[in-house]
Image (cartoon, grey):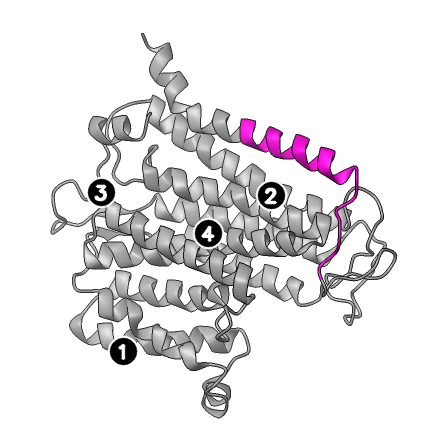
């Protein structure tokens, strides 16, 4: 009798492993015949790619940068294993990232998806590869800020998934038909980073006044990536989207029903990502650190460090505990939730 619940608990992990195996088989089969016409912004075989590594004529156009994405696969599978293990132990959990729930499964699946998504881009140099790479990044980065908005607006899970699906689907269609900036100079991945930090600020220190002041946090985040407020003012047509910095405050009608512990995991995730970003800046042909024929590639290290960041943020989300004012059932996952998630 004990074996059946355990098997159910690890079902998402086994399904994901099976999907990855299918992806590998299809990729090798298709790649044997070549990847077809490369995207217009990709270099020819033998030249140095946009991400420094020399373009190969073999199965993978950028072998090292492609395989560096295995870090996301390992991180996501580890999340599924941890969630399955915790669920198999039974009982209740203090939040939805301590057992298998639809939201925790979505997070782990999005991390795994980052791996194949980026692999297709670096491995094939096709437009489809660039599209699926960007869709995978948006599929991940959208989760934390929409999840924060859901908590601050006291949305039911159904609304969270509806908003999340709408954002990712709109982006995927827009990129495919209109381009990376959706035809309006708007790059969702880049804007999602300040939205996450802004929403996290409101989540932690909610107050009526902070709701409206929180948008200014976005300018601080943008400045950390080299986009100063002065730059935004001088180029309003390019940075028109800054008004979205006030979206979290607009939605935050209630204080969060939970409290997260930021040390050490949140700050470890931030540090890992910022170090990855600094290394990412060196992974281009114009950098003096670019060695196109080396087995050590800056962009592959970027993949590994950002994969580590996703793990840190996963552990951070597991620290949340309901506050005394939390509505009943806001953060606890018991038998009903487990049954709904198929665990």
Boundaries of the magenta span: 18-39
The answer to whether residue 97 of the structure is visible from this angle is no
Which of the pair 109/200 is nearer the observer? 109
Which residue is identified by label 3?
Answer: 331
Closer to the N terminus: mark 2 or mark 1?
2
- Give the CA distance from mark 3 to mark 1: 28 Å
In the image, residue 204 sits, relative to residue 162, either above or below, namely: below
Could you tell me how many numbered marks the image carries?
4
- Give the CA distance from mark 4 to mark 2: 13 Å
In the image, residue 168 sits, relative to residue 157, either above or below, namely: below
Q: In this view, does 327 lie to the left or right of 164?
A: left
Q: In this view, does 3 lie to the left or right of 226?
A: left
Which residue is identified by label 2?
Answer: 116
The answer to whether residue 111 of the structure is visible from this angle is yes
Alpha-carbon neighbours of circle 4 within 10 Å: few (<14), some, or many (≥20)? many
Which residue is identified by label 4?
Answer: 139
Closer to the N terminus: mark 3 or mark 1?
1
Closer to the N terminus: mark 4 or mark 1?
4
| Label 1: which secondary element | helix
């Amino acid at each position: 009798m004990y074996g059946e619940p355990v098997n159910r608990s690890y079902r998402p992990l086994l399904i994901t492993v099976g999907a990855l195996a299918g992806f590998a088989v299809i990729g090798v089969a298709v790649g044997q015949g070549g990847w077809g016409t490369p995207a217009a912004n990709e270099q020819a075989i033998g030249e140095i790619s946009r991400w420094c590594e020399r373009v190969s004529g073999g199965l993978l156009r950028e072998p090292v940068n492609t395989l560096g994405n295995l870090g996301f696969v390992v991180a996501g599978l580890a999340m599924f294993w941890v969630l399955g293990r915790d669920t198999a132990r039974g009982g209740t959990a203090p939040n939805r990232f301590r057992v298998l729930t639809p939201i925790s499964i979505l997070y782990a699946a999005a991390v795994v998806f980052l791996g194949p998504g980026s692999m297709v881009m670096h491995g094939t140099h096709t437009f489809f590869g660039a599209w699926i790479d960007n869709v995978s990044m948006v599929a991940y980065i959208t989760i934390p800020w929409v999840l924060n908005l859901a908590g601050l607006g006291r949305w039911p899970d159904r609304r969270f998934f509806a908003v999340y699906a709408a954002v990712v689907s709109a982006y995927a269609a827009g990129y495919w038909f209109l381009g990376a900036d959706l035809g309006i100079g708007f790059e969702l991945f880049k804007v999602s980073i300040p939205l996450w930090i802004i929403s996290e600020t409101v989540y932690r220190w909610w107050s009526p006044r902070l709701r409206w002041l929180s948008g200014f946090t976005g300018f601080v985040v943008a400045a950390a990536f080299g986009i100063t407020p002065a730059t935004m003012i001088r180029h309003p047509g390019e940075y028109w989207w800054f008004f979205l910095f006030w979206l979290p405050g607009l939605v935050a009608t209630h204080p969060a029903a939970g409290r997260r512990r930021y040390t050490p995991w949140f700050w470890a995730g931030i540090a890992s990502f910022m170090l990855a970003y600094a290394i990412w800046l060196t992974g281009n042909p114009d950098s003096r650190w670019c060695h196109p024929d080396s087995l050590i590639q800056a962009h592959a290290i970027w993949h590994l460090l950002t994969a580590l960041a996703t793990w840190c943020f996963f552990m951070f989300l597991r620290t949340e505990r309901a506050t005394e004012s939390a509505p009943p059932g806001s953060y606890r996952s018991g038998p009903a939730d487990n049954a709904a998630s198929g665990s």
